[in-house]
Amino acid sequence: MRTIDVIGTAIDNSFRSKLRTSLTVIAIFIGAFTLTITNGLGTGINDYITNTVAAIGAQDVLTVTKVGTDAAGSGPKKYNPDLVAASGGGRPGTTVQALTPTDITIISDLKGVKSVQPTLSISPGYIQNGSGTKYTLTAIGAVPGITLQLATGSQLSSTSSESQIVLAKSYVKALGLSSNAAAIGATVKIGIRDAARNPSTIDATVVGISEASLGAIADAATTNSALTQKLFDAQTVGLPGTAKDRYSQASVRFDGSATAAEVTKLKDRLTKAGYSGQTVADQIGTFKTVIDVIVLVLNAFAVIALLAASFGIVNTLLMSVQERTREIGLMKAMGMGGHKVFGLFSFEAVFIGFLGSAIGAAAAILVGSGVSAALSGSVFSGLPGLTLIAFSPGSIATIILVVMAIAFVAGTLPAAKAARQDPIESLRYE
Amino acid sequence: MAIPILAARDVTKSYGRGPGRFDALKGVSLEIYEGESVAIVGKSGSGKSTLMHLLALLDRPSSGSIELAGSDAVLLTGRTLNTTRNRTFGFVFQQFFLTGGASVLENVILPLKIAGVGSRERKRRGLEALVALELEDKATSKASNLSGGQKQRAVIARALVNNPRVIFADEPTGNLDSATGAVVEDILFALNRDKGITLIVVTHDEELAARCDRRVYIRDGLVVGIESAVAA
C-alpha cells in the first residue's frame, strides 16, 4: 500500500465513527486551546517587556554604582560625607555612596569599558511655552543609545549640541500645543534655580512625544546630553568643584557585540574595583523569570489535560481496532504487511491529534485576540502597546507538532495490537 | 508431467501442547493443477478450513510442506509472502467481509490499494470487475445497502480485481438462498472455465461439490477419498 493511500485510508477511517472521533477531538481541543492561550499570554507579556526594555536603558550600557562600605547592620550608621541620595530605583531616603571624578577615571581605565558618563541628576523647576502657564517638570537625562517609545517625533541625539527634549504626552495639551505633531520642533523654556536659588531659563527644542510605558515615569521629560549638561551647569552655579562633581551613578558603555560571558567578566572587574554594575537585562530579567515560571506552571496544567486526552485516543483506537478486527484480518490475508497496518492506525491517531490541536489553536487565536483587544481598550488602556495574549507562528506550530507527537505515542499501543493480529483468528471473529 | 500450482506434502497442523494438543490435520497430501476446480469437502471440525488456510499461505504447517508452483512456500517470508498472496490469490468468504460504510467500488479495489496500484488505474480496474459481475450501477452505493446476492457478487469482484491465479471460496453460498446461490456458483465456475482461474471451494454442500472437477473428502484431519467425477 502506498503511503498516500495509508494516509487517505486513515483519514477516511477516522471519519467513519464521527461521534467517537469528535469526542476525542474535543478532549484534545481543550488541552491544545489551554496550551495555546497560556503560551500566548507568556509571549504577549514578554514581548511587551522586551519592547519596553529599550526605553529603560540601552542594551550596551551598565549602570554602575559604588558599593557602600557600611551597607550592613541596623541602627544609626556612621556618617559618610560621600553619601548622596540614590537617583531613582530605590525607595525614598535610600542613599548610595557618591562617585567622584577619581572613581570615573578608575572605571574608564578598566578593560572592556568604552566610555563612562556620570549620570547627572537634574532638578528643573518648571516648563513654559512662550508666556503660557508654567508647569512643574521632572526630567531625566537620557543614557546614550536609549530608545524611547515615542508616539511621534524622533529619538534624542546624544551627539548633537542642540538642546533636545522629549515630553510625555500629557504636556502637549497643557502647554497649549494643538497636537502631538504640532509639538515637534516647538521651543519651550525650562526654568531652573542654582545653588543660591537664583532663577534662570534654558530654551529646548521638542523632538518627540513619548508614550506612557512600563519603563517611563509618567508625566516626565527626557533630555539629551547637551540639554542635561546645560541644566546641570545652571543648577550647580555657585557650588565649589568638589560639591559639584558628585554623582549617584554612572553609565558605562561597552562593546555592543560583547558576549554574555564578556559582560559577566566586565561586571566581575567592576566588583573587584569596588563598584557594582547592572545591565538592563539584569534589571528586567527578574520580571521575565517570574512570568516565565507562571507560564510554565500554566503550561503544565495544559499538558496534564493533553495527557488525559491522550488516554481518550488510546481508548478510541482500541475500540476501533476491536470493531475492525475482521477488516484488519481481511487486509492482512490480502497481503497487507503488519507495519502498514501499524501505520494505518497510528496515522489515524496523529490525524485525530492534528484535528484537535489545529482547531484548538485556531479557536485560541480567535478568543485570545478578542479578549486581548477588549482588555487593552479598557483595563489596560494605560499601557499602550500591550497585547496581553500574542501568538507567534513558531510556538503555534510547536504546539500542534507536540500534540501530534503525543497522539502518535498514544496510538502506538492500539496500532501495535492491530499489527499483531493473526488474519485467521481475525476472520474467524464474529 | 505438469507442476501443480499448489501442493500439500504430508502436511500436519496441531494447535496447543501437551494433553490439550489438538491435531487439526494428521498428514494430508494433495496436488492442485492450474485451471482445475477442486472442492474440499468435510463436516465442520474436519480440518477443511485449516487445509485451506495452509494452501492460501495464511498459516504454516507444523510439519510437511506447501509448494507454490513447485517451490517450497516456507522460503516466502515477510514482504515477499504478502506480495505473493496479494498477486496470486483471491478470497471469497461466506460472511462477505465487506466494509458496510464504504462504497462498493472502494471495497472492490481494496486488493489493488494494498498492492500499491495508482488511484486512476484502481478505479478503472475496479469498474471493469464490477461490469463483469453486472454491479456497475451499484459502484457508488454503500456496501451495506446491497442484497445478499449482490454482496457476494461484490466479494467475487474483489477477489477477481487483481487477476489472481487461484480463488479460494469458503462456503461461498452458505449465506444465500438456493436461487441466488446458484447464480453465484455459475459466476465462479464461469471464471474457472473462461479465464482459467484455479478454483478451490471449501464446502459441506454436496451439490456445490459435485460441480467441481475433483472432490477431496476430509474427515478428522485425514483425506478419506478423492473423486474425479465429471460434473453434469
Image (cartoon, rainbow, N blue to C red):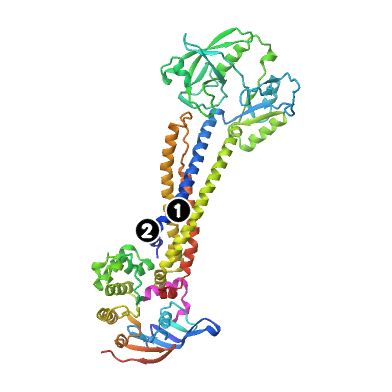
One can see residue A186 in this view: yes
Question: Is B117 situated above or below B39?
Answer: above
Q: Residue at x 44, y 37 (%)?
A: A372
- The x and y percentages for residue B33 are 36, 85
Query: Any magenta on residue B78?
Result: yes
- The x and y percentages for residue A337 are 44, 69
Q: Which mark is residue B186?
A: none
Kind of residue sitting beneath label 1:
Ala
Examine the residues drawn in magenta and state their main secondary structure.
Answer: helix
Q: Image quadrant for the N terminus of chain B?
A: bottom left
One can see residue A185 in this view: no
For marks 1 and 2, the one nearer the N-term is 2
Quadrant in the rendering for residue B205: bottom left
Q: Which contiguous range is marked in magenta?
A: B70-89
Nearer to me, A410 or A276: A410
Which structural element holds mark 1?
helix
Q: Specify the subunit that label 1 lies on.
A: A
Q: Specify the subunit that label 2 lies on.
A: A
Residue under label 2? A18
Mark 1 Cα shell of 10 Å, populated few (<14), some (14-19), many (≥20): many
Q: Which mark is residue A27?
A: 1
Q: Residue furthest right?
A: A78
- The x and y percentages for residue A44 are 49, 38
Query: Any magenta on residue A135?
Result: no
- State the count of labels: 2
Kind of residue sitting beneath label 2:
Lys
